[in-house]
Amino acid sequence: MTQQEMPNPIDLYGAAAKGTSEIIAGVKSSQLGDSTPCGEWNVQTLIEHLVGGTGIASGSLSGAGPEAPPQGTSHAAAFDAGAAKVLDSAKTPGVLDKTIASPLGDMPGGQLLAAFFMETLIHGWDLAKATGQNTDMPADLAETCYAMFGPKADEWRKSGAFGPRAEVAEDASAQVKLLGALGRRA
């Protein structure tokens, strides 16, 4: 998928962040030590990763470099504050077309934001799965994410970004195919 074919990454990230915020808000304090599909991360560290990712994304897009994780009165408030900063940085004129230096490498801002869309959507699913919440992704987000990242999963797997591919049926939903490509089992 070329940059011109890619859906608006601001809209994608905003939708994924909204859904993930709702999942974070649904986490009970008694679940923070529970395991997640992310191997070594428990619910607490996964939430911290999501919140910290907002600081990396907004700092990279703004050019300020990685920012300290946002603080809030709750995990959801901290995530919401960070996601709002990401969206504000992404809306800066020209930033989506500009080459951005980030921990993920140098790439156009739109591609960087798309990577954080995928990360937010997938880790939202991980968190929902770990805490017994609804794991259904919006079908349009799952389809778009699979189209954008499914073909690249094996390449990224080499770097350790994803676990081994999980085999899925050819007629599986886009969500199941996406999860399988990224090393998760629905």
Image (cartoon, rainbow, N blue to C red):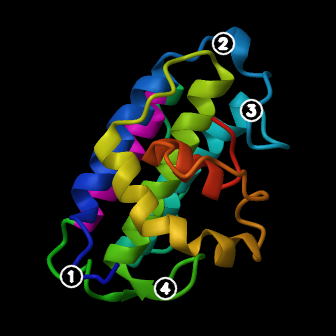
Q: Which residue is drawn at 38% across and 37% down?
A: 80
Report crowding for label 2: few under 14, some 14 to 19, many 20 or more residues within 10 A (C-alpha): few
N-terminal of the pair, mark 2 or mark 1, is 1
Spatial separation of the CA atoms under disc 4 and disc 2 = 36 Å
Q: Of the residues shown, which amino acid type is indicated by label 2?
A: Ser
N-terminal of the pair, mark 3 or mark 2, is 2
The residue that mark 1 highlights is: 4
The residue that mark 4 highlights is: 101
User: Bounds of the magenta span?
Assistant: 76-90
Q: Quadrant of the C terminus?
A: top right
Q: Position of residue 181 (x, y in %)?
A: 62, 58
Q: Is residue 112 above or below residue 75?
A: below
Q: Of the residues shown, which amino acid type is indicated by label 3?
A: Thr
Most extreme residue toward the right, as rendered? 40
Q: Is 88 contained in the magenta span? A: yes
Frontmost of labels 1 and 4 is 1
Q: Is residue 152 above or below residue 133?
A: below
The mark total stands at: 4
Quadrant of the image occupied by residue 86? bottom left
The residue that mark 3 highlights is: 36
Q: Main secondary structure of the magenta part?
A: helix
User: Does residue 157 appear in the picture of this structure?
Assistant: yes
Q: Is 77 contained in the magenta span? A: yes
Compared across the picture, whether 81 is left or right of 168 comes to left
Spatial separation of the CA atoms under disc 1 and disc 3 = 35 Å
